[in-house]
Amino acid sequence: MGGFFGVVSKRPCATDLFYGVDYHSHLGTKRAGMVTRVGDQFFRSIHDIENSYFRTKFCDELSKFQGNLGIGVISDTDAQPIVVNSHLGRFGIVTVGKINNLDELVQHCLDNKQQFTELSSGRTNPTELIALLITQGKDFADGIQNVYNMVKGSCSMLILCEDGIIAARDFYGRTPIVIGKDGSGYAVAFDSHSYVNLDYTTVRFVGPGEVVKVTLDGMETLLPAQPKKQVCSFLWIYYGFPATDYENINVEEMRYKGGQALGASDNVEADYVSAIPDSGIGMAVGYSNGKCLPYKRGVVKYTPTWSRSFMPVNQSEREHVAKMKLIPNRAVLKGKRVVFCDDSIVRGTQLRDNVKMLYDYGADKVHVRISCPPLLYGCPFLNFSASKTEMELLTRRVVEKLEGDSIKNFDQYIKTDTKEYADMVDEIRRHLGVDSLKFNNIDTIVEAIGLPKCDLCTHCFDGSSYGQ
């Protein structure tokens, strides 16, 4: 995934920029960068954060970031921000998204006699590609419209221009952009919680496909929002920080409502409810109240020396690190029937290992409840956990096991009242080794979010979406 943050202020922006970017660290694990500017002079740093905190990389460099304007990013892709010199002037840019036709667009730029220089990873930097597409326009608005017209997938961006920041939300609004204001200027962010402790107050959410320029004089719409939107429902389910709002809808409240609905309809017998931390906590508290069962911490996440960004590239090592972060509480588990709430099942490996640990530490019964429906499709729009190839998804592998090489009844696995769905869930349960397993359904998560189904992207669950 990834997240970005920008500041336009009457005062030096380095401190606000530093903390604002840091508060997006839950969204990415690969690289981070910041850039500020004074006139045509840019001050930029980019660091690898795969094995360290953002703060440890940038804290000692704060004095170098001069000026009142700046943008930064936590990225799961290539190095950002980049700085470009073009007929539009010099500008910095950060992006969040997924470009499915990258090779095609690279060739388009090469045919247009443009060149690529950000090749440190041995492949084209997607942010540089977006910058080149923008410079094909007669101005920034025209160039960003060119991006919307040509990119298959999604792309949101912040552009650091001479007098402010241009914020462009991807055409269908799959990812968010929100603007906050204080007495000295504005903050532009992916997540609204990122500026709360900096004393900014939300003034507006950028609409799908909308392009807004933010300066000290105020906000100007360069391209209006388009009427259709498909906000990623997984933002509320998994990626969003509990204190953040998307479309004026709070992440923690959504998780609570989804858990409460599942708890109220569940007839399982248990002693208490627990969570797989952190993103399962809101659901577990809601489930606890919906079912009138106490909430206890049967598993605790250890965070003092294990940053979220410490995730090795090797999958087996990643699973080991993920396990090491969760510590079972034997005194709370021993001899108890426990409902454990988690956000989703992707590959299923980590959850299966966690479940084994719960039994090893004395749990009598383990019942798993998942806040979203089974993940049946890879995500073609964003770079995040659900974006794995479909055969990496546990649910897809289970369906192929049940159906054989030819899946003739795939739509029956999406409907919750079919034999196929029941067989699929039971096979996943056996794979995990738990006593029972239930998922929330799409109607419940749509109701918990509070937006019309047509305004949400639920492609991961049912294959439905529009756009490209």
Image (tube, grey):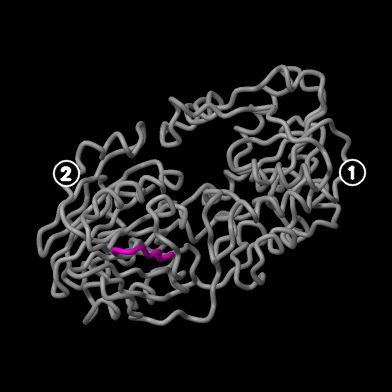
Which callout, 1 or 2, points to the residue nearer the camera?
A: 2
Residue 267 is tagged as: 1
In the displayed structure, 185 sits above or below 191; it is: below
Q: Determine crowd level at label 1: few under 14, some 14-19, many 20+ residues with C-alpha closer than 10 A.
A: few
Question: Which label is found at residue 156?
Answer: none
Q: Which residues are magenta?
A: 178-184
Instruction: Name the residue rendered at 60%, 36% in the picture.
Output: 277
Decide if residue 315 is in sight here: yes
Image height of 442 relative to 163, above or below: above
Q: Residue 16: x percent and y percent?
A: 30, 51
> Callout 2, which amino acid?
Ser
Q: Nearer the viewer, residue 373 or 160?
A: 160
Q: Which mark is residue 63?
A: 2
- For marks 1 and 2, the one nearer the N-term is 2
Within 10 angstroms of label 2, few (less than 14), some, or many (20 or more) residues? few
Q: Position of residue 427 (x, y in %)?
A: 77, 40
Residue located 88% across and 35% down the image: 269
Q: Viewed as shown, does residue 262 lie left or right of 344?
A: right
Quadrant hosting residue 444: bottom right
